[in-house]
Amino acid sequence: MRSGIFFLSFLLVLVSCSGHSELDKALRLSGENRIELEKVIRHFSQDTSDSLKLKAALFLIENMPGHCSVVDSCIVDYYLQVDLKNKAIPFYLKNILYNLPQYYVDLSGVKKVEDVKVIKSDFLINHIENMFHIWEKVPWGKDISFETFCEYILPYRLDGEPLTKLMEHYYYFPIDSFSQQFEDYNITVDEFLYNYIWRLLPQCGREFELTSPVGEHYVADCIWDSYKVLSESRLSCVPAAIDFTPCWPSRNGKHFWNIIEDPCLVKKTFSENYIDHYAKVYRKTYSRNPFPEK
């Protein structure tokens, strides 16, 4: 107990002395919600055995500013229509539909709320515990570095989906039921995704009944496919990300695709083989990066 108190005291002194640290900035931006973020830090500071979970919590909090949900009435109505017209779709897939408006309409002037101001401690603690459990359970977890885990597996959101729905319905893959099969078979991550995740997770068709601003009918495209693979990869502790080109060099349009790192194959990275046709490629990350100059 004494060691836990010392550990927490050391952390608080470190934060207060840093002044301009990313953590300090995030806590100042959180306003009245600061108490929720400090609860998370305090929770993982009680026991030195949770030191890695504490670092993960700090990573999420430090990079939280900028992650937000749209709360404008027109988009909230769209969320409700998605729920009403697509009741049979599992939440982890419905989450993708929530993200579509940002690719079809200009959301620069709509009302948004930042996660750092509203996220709850219980949600963040539960998410970190669940993701660490999955990381410790899969046999390739030992080959995934902590830095890779934080950036490509740990994040609690895909993009700009409504945080309130995440906190109410977030879905975790029951990895425990497959632990014996992991021990019996020496499978690659690619084989695991194909045989266990993509075949066993709840699926749905590729056409959806939506409403404005996306349109009455939406047929799954590269945006849908990329978010789907990203969601399923994170739920099964496979490092993945979305790369995209905002504009082709020789024609109109943009394109999204996934990169997947397979620890079982000496960090082999799977991606689409069109790279020579791209003028500029960007990657979606949870960690904050400087916005590129035009």
Image (cartoon, grey):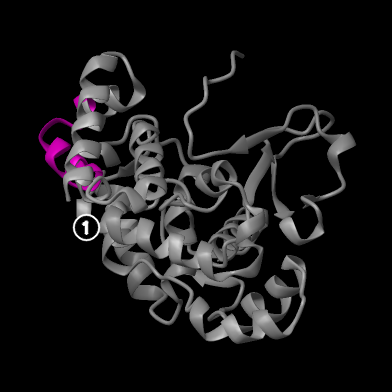
Residue drawn at x 27%, y 49% as measured from the top left? 44
Q: Quadrant of residue 140?
A: bottom right
Q: Which residue is mark 1?
A: 122
Task: Say left or right for 248 vs 126.
Answer: right
Q: Is residue 227 left or right of residue 49?
A: right
Q: Give the residue displayed 22% in from the left and 49% down from the top.
A: 46
Q: Position of residue 186 (x, y in %)?
A: 77, 76
- Judge whether 203 appears above or below 155 on screen: below
Give x and y (percent) for residue 265: 81, 58
290 sits to left or right of 8: right
- Magenta stretch holds residue 39: yes
Magenta highlight range: 28-41
Closer-to-camera residue (249/113): 113
Looking at this view, name the residue that lies furthest to the front.
2
* Residue 272 falls inside the magenta stretch: no
**Secondary structure category for the residue under label 1:** helix
Q: Image point 52% across, 86% down: which residue?
A: 177
Q: Depth check: 166 or 13 in front? A: 13
- List x then y, in percent, for residue 181: 65, 85
**Position of residue 253 in the picture relative to residue 166 (left or right):** right
Residue 238 appears in view = no
User: From the image, which quarter does the C terminus lie in?
Assistant: top right
* Residue appearing at x 21%, y 58% in the figure: 122
Q: Amino acid at mark 1?
A: Asp
**170 and 102: which is toward the camera:** 170
Q: Main secondary structure of the magenta part?
A: helix
Against 13, is 283 above or below? below
